Amino acid sequence: MFDLLTQLLGVCLISYAIAVLMPAWRALLVAMLLLASATAISALREWWTPEQHGCSRACKFEDLLDIPLLPVARAGFLTGATVRALTFLPQARNLSARTISIICLAGGAVALAVVVFVPSLVYWRPLRIL
């Protein structure tokens, strides 16, 4: 139905929008802590486990975590959280709603640019011990 690039960009923009639409800085902080915890657990799991070569007959939940959509969603969310944090600054309270909307739209372009032009940053994996 959709090609891979359309899916990747859609996932990036949806996760970006979720972060940008956070209502308060506390909600954004909780979401960032949850994302950081999940990323740390995933990195530790990958660091300590031997390398797997994908699914054979039946995929486990851990095998599904290696699909490329999850790192793209994480990159979009982090970019959105950064933009939303910038709009929470005390100086941003004096900005008009139009200016904040322009900042959020520009951040969406940055999120897409990160996914398209810096894929090594999006798909970074920790070094393995074994």
Image (cartoon, helix red, strand yellow):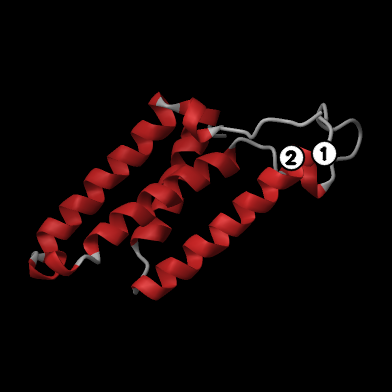
- Residue 28 percent across, percent down from the top left: 41, 67
User: In the orientation shown, which residue stands out farthest toward the right?
Assistant: 57
What residue appears at the point 79 percent right and 49 percent down from the top-left corner? 61
**Above or below: residue 31 compared with residue 40:** below
- Which residue corresponds to mark 1? 49
Quadrant of residue 26 within the rendered picture: bottom left
Q: Residue 76, percent across and down? A: 43, 46
> Callout 2: 10 Å neighbours few (<14), some, many (20+)?
some
Q: Which mark is residue 46?
A: 2
Farthest residue to the front: give it. Answer: 129
Residue at the image position 77 percent from the left and 31 percent from the top: 129
Q: CA distance from mark 2 to mark 1?
A: 5 Å
Measuring from the top left, give residue 93's x and y in whole percent.
Answer: 13, 70
Q: Is residue 3 shown to the viewer in this render?
A: no
Q: Is residue 84 left or right of residue 36?
A: left
Q: Residue at x 24, y 48 (%)?
A: 105
- Give the SS element for disc 2: helix
Task: Tell me the amino acid under the disc marked 1.
Answer: Thr
Give the vertical position of 90 relative to 68 (above or below). below
Residues at discs 2 and 1 in contact (Cβ within 8 Å): yes
- When asked about the image quadrant of residue 126, the answer is top right
Going by the image, does 114 lie left or right of 45?
Answer: left
Q: Secondary structure at mark 1?
A: loop
Q: Which residue is depicted at the point 48% across and 61% down?
A: 32
Is residue 130 rendered to the left or right of residue 43? right
